[in-house]
Image (spheres, grey):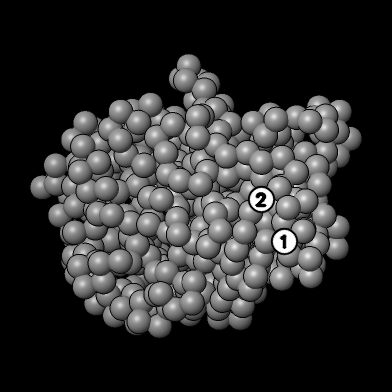
Amino acid sequence: MDIIKGHIAHFPLATATPDADLSIMRDGALVIEGEDIIAMGHANDMVAAYPHAHIHDHSGKWLIPGLIDSHVHYPQTESIAYYGEQLLDWLKKATFPTEQKFADETHARAIAEVFVSQLFRHGTTTALVYSSVHKHACEAIFQAATRYNMALIAGKVCMDRHCPPALQDTAESAQQDSAALIERWHNKGRNLYALTPRFAPTSSAQQLKRLGELAQQYPDVFVQTHLSENKDEIDWVASLYPDADNYLDVYDRAGLVRHRSVFGHALHLSESEWQCLADRDATIAFCPSSNLFLGSGLFDLQRAKRAKVPVTLATDVGAGTGFSMLKTYADGYKVSQLQQAPLSPREGFYMATQSPAAAYNLAQDIGNLNPGSKADIVVLDPQCDELTRLRLGDMAEFDDCWFALSILGTERAVAETWVAGQAVYSRDN
C-alpha cells in the first residue's frame, strides 16, 4: 500500500462547465492499493488511517490524473520535426519513408519502447495510437504497453491505395488482420483496439466497407482516422468519392461514424458534418501543434461547443512537435487566442483528462483521481527550474501552475508518472 502526498487537482465527473467544476485539495493524499486508488483525503487524515502505508512525499507539488493523448502516431517518433511541408507532401517525404522501416519487426519493437518511454516522461498514461500498416508493429505497441499495465488504444493502419506499394494492404487483408488483432488484444488487460483507416484517400470504398463491417461486429471497439485536416486533402476526397455528400459522409456510409469514433483535426467542416458528428456521438481530437506546424488551419472550438461535439486534446506526433500535453494545451490556447476565445487553463486540463475519459466511456478507470479508478497519476512540479521557481510561488493556484508550466515547462515539470499503482518514470532517477 502506498500514500502519495501533494496538492490534488482533478475533475471527479464529466461536466459542461469545467471552469466551475474542478476539484482542488491542498495538502491532500492518494492511497493506492494494488492497481487502484482506494482513498483520497487530507494528508494527515490518510496517514493516520493507513499507518502502515509507504509514504511518497510530494508536498508542494500537484497530483493530477495521468494525461490522455487522443491522436498520436508511434511510427513517427523518429520523423518528428521534419522541415517545411504541408500535409500531403509531408506524408510522402517524411511519414511514408519512416513507416516503411516498420516492416522490420525488431525495429518496430525498439521504437515502441522509445515511444512508451516518451509518453511516461511527459506524463501521458493513455493514448490513442496509430501503428503502421504492418500487423506485427501493432502487436509491438500492445506488447510494450502491456509490460507496464498501461491503458492503450491502438490499431493497425489500413491503406490499400495512394501510398507506396510497400505500405499497401488490401480490403480483405485489412479486415482479416484487424479482426485477428481485435480477438487477441481488445479488452485483454487494459488494451483496447481501434479500427484505423489512415484517411479516406488511402482507403478504397471497399476497404472502408470491410472495416465498417468489423465496427458493426465489434460495437465497443474504437474507430480512429483523419478528417478535414487540409483543404487540398478535402478536394482530393471529393474527387475520389464524388457520390459522397462531404468528407465525413465517406466514413458514415461505411458505418464508421459512431460512439467511440475519434476524428483527428476536423478543421474545415460543413454544417451537415457538425450535425452528423453530434448525432452519432463521435469525438474530435484537437491537434493544435500539428495544425500550426503543417499550416493546416485553426480549429473552431466554439463551433464544436455549439454543436455539442466532444473535443479532446492530442499531440499528433510526428507532425505534432512534441509529446507534452501541457505544450499541446499551450498551442491550443494560442489557436483560440487568434479567434478571440481563449481556451482557459481548466478547460484545457479537462480536455486532456476527464473529457476524453468520459467521451470514450472509460471514466470509471482513467481521467480522474476518484477512489476506484486506476492509479494512473502524474506529479507536477510547479518549481521545476529557476524560471518556474521565480514565476510560481509556493501558494500559486492550480490554474496558474497549469498555464505557466504549459508555456514555460519542459518535461522536467513532470516529476513522476505512475501507471496502475507503479511508478514508471521519475525525473530524478
Q: Are marks 2 and 1 in contact (CB under 8 Å)?
A: yes
Tag 1: amino acid:
Ala
Q: Nearer the viewer, residue 29 or 73?
A: 29
Residue that mark 1 sits on: 49
Give how far across and how far down residue 113 sits, in percent.
Answer: 65, 71
Left or right, residue 424 beside residue 284:
right
Disc nearest the viewer among 2 and 1: 1
Give how far across and how far down residue 185 sits, in percent.
Answer: 43, 78
Q: Is residue 213 above or below residue 77?
A: below
Residue that mark 2 sits on: 41
Residue 331 at least partly seen: no
Numbered circle sitting on residue 100: none
Give the residue furthest to the top.
340
Give the residue furthest to the right.
386
Tag 2: amino acid:
Gly
Give how far across and how far down residue 109 sits, in percent.
Answer: 60, 76
Question: How many C-alpha atoms fall within 10 Å of the one at disc 1: few (<14), some, or many (≥20)?
Answer: few
Q: Is residue 155 above or below residue 176?
A: above
Residue 19 at least partly seen: yes
Residue at 42 percent of width and 39 percent of height? 15
Marks 2 and 1 sit apart, C-alpha to C-alpha, by 10 Å
Q: Is residue 283 above or below residue 20?
A: below
Q: Nearer the viewer, residue 181 or 160?
A: 181
Left or right, residue 322 beside residue 202:
right
Q: Earlier in the sequence, mark 2 or mark 1?
A: 2
